[in-house]
Image (cartoon, rainbow, N blue to C red):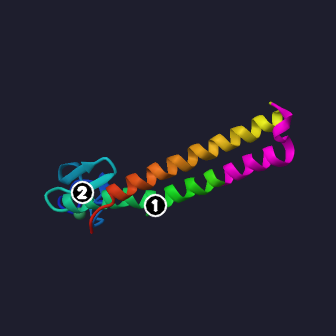
């Protein structure tokens, strides 16, 4: 493939417009190339958007919350059905407790992520 702007061989493709770019006509970004003096702003915007999309609109937060609640339920069920509170520190109580604490940690983490997503969401 040739560079769109010169006769040199292309080293990559502009993330915004898809033109082939040689080194002297490419601006490099961490996640892609842009036509120099043409598509830089566009590519920066695309990179920002794709970063936000990877997290999803609160997607990570709700997934974490669901797995946290599940762990709390599983831990509680372990202790309630298999361990029993009179049994002292048995293996089932220990495992139930571990599940329970992990679930609690996940729920707290989900709340932190959700709060961070809200404060960082771009104003469109
Ligand atoms: Zn371009």
Please name the residue shown 57% across and 47% down the image: 106
**Location of the C terminus (image quadrant):** bottom left
- Disc 2 under 8 Å from ligand 1? The reply is yes
Q: In the image shown, does 86 or 79 lie closer to the viewer?
A: 86
Pick whichever of labels 1 and 2 is earlier in the sequence.
Answer: 2
Q: In the image shown, does 98 or 13 lie closer to the viewer?
A: 98
11 left or right of 105 in image: left
Please tell me whether mark 1 or mark 2 is closer to you in this view.
1
Q: Quadrant of ligand 1?
A: bottom left
Residue 32, image x, y percentages: 32, 53
**Bounds of the magenta segment:** 70-88
User: Magenta stretch containing residue 82, yes or no?
Assistant: yes
How many neighbours does mark 1 have within 10 angstroms: few (below 14), some (14-19), or many (20 or more)? some
Residue 40's image quarter? bottom left
Q: In the image shown, does 44 or 89 lie closer to the viewer?
A: 89
Q: What's the CA distance linking mark 1 and mark 2?
A: 30 Å
Please name the residue shown 74% across and 50% down the image: 74
Which secondary structure is most common in the magenta stretch? helix
Q: Could you say which disc has been placed on residue 94 in the image?
A: none
Q: Looking at the image, can residue 23 be seen?
A: yes
Seen as rendered, the residue at the extreme front is: 86
Label 1: which residue?
A: 58
Residue 19's image quarter? bottom left
Label 2: which residue?
A: 34
């Amino acid at each position: 493939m040739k560079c769109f702007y010169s006769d040199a061989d292309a080293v990559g493709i502009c993330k915004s417009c898809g033109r082939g770019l040689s080194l002297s006509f490419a601006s490099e970004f961490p996640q892609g190339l842009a036509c120099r003096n043409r598509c830089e702003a566009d590519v920066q915007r695309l990179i920002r958007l794709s970063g936000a999309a990877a997290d999803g609109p609160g997607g990570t937060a709700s997934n974490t919350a669901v797995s946290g609640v599940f762990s709390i339920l599983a831990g509680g069920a372990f202790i309630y059905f298999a361990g029993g509170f009179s049994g002292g520190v048995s293996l089932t109580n220990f495992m139930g407790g571990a599940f329970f604490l992990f679930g609690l940690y996940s729920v707290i983490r989900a709340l932190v992520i959700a709060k961070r997503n809200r404060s960082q969401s771009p104003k469109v």
